[in-house]
Amino acid sequence: DAKTTQPPSMDCAEGRAANLPCNHSTISGNEYVYWYRQIHSQGPQYIIHGLKNNETNEMASLIITEDRKSSTLILPHATLRDTAVYYCIVRVGGSARQLTFGSGTQLTVLP
Amino acid sequence: DGGITQSPKYLFRKEGQNVTLSCEQNLNHDAMYWYRQDPGQGLRLIYYSQIVNDFQKGDIAEGYSVSREKKESFPLTVTSAQKNPTAFYLCASSRTTNEKLFFGSGTQLSVL
């Protein structure tokens, strides 16, 4: 399974878009990109996932580059409640294993 | 409400003692997982189970044991062989191993 690289921390002003990058340069063709977030001392929460195409749901948008070597999670209008650690992971569809989550990006939304 | 329930929220272990962390889900999910999280770190997979009566080791299984006798339950035992058990333990489930994870609220285990 491919490894991912994320910046350790980012700040964002409340009401602005938060763009969280993730590099996965060794991703294979059958590996999906998943995003989760974890608010302090709670269990992680699923946000979104995708394979090749850009995806959007009620929480966020996921932009995957054409070569699939990187992706960006976009929170369109960040609120204080979006302050959390955001994890980007890649895993093979149908794999019986769930990847280890790396250290993620600490997003702090500022008032 | 459907979800995953972990108990207790806080647990203390004495030297040489085995302790068991509970994880129950009412989502009718086939797959269940245990993760360990150390301060400021990501999550590492301890054990996972795809179906009842079956489970597999994850990346850091040494010093831990599990059972999956019922679909809704996946208890984790931290044995005395685990020399550094202090951590935040998270249980998760998914409909199948191919789908997104749902997490419980975690158990903080500390050594006295």
Image: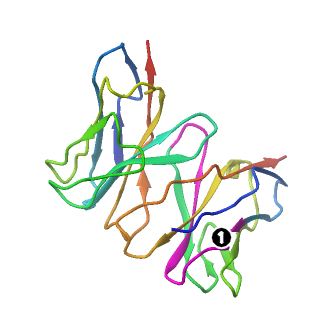
Q: Which residues are magenta?
A: A22-42
Residue positioned 66% across, 52% down in the render: A104
Q: Nearer the viewer, residue B38 or A76?
A: B38
Residue B5 placement, left or right of A110 = left
Coordinates of residue B59 in the picture (x, y in percent): 42, 49
Residue positioned 37% across, 28% down in the render: B82
Residue A110 placement, left or right of B94 = right
Residue B55 placement, left or right of B36 = left
Q: Relative to A89, does residue A26 appear above or below in the rendering?
A: below
Q: Residues within 10 Å of mark 1 (few under 14, many from 20)?
A: some
Q: Tell whether position A23 is magenta.
A: yes
Q: Which residue is mark 1?
A: A24
Coordinates of residue B89 in the picture (x, y in percent): 43, 37
Residue A43 placement, left or right of B96 = right
Q: Quadrant of residue A61?
A: bottom right
Q: How many marks?
A: 1
Q: Tell whether position A50 is magenta.
A: no
Q: Nearer the viewer, residue A45 or A91?
A: A91
Quadrant of the image for the C terminus of chain B? top left
Residue positioned 20% across, 44% down in the render: B67
Coordinates of residue B94 in the picture (x, y in percent): 35, 61
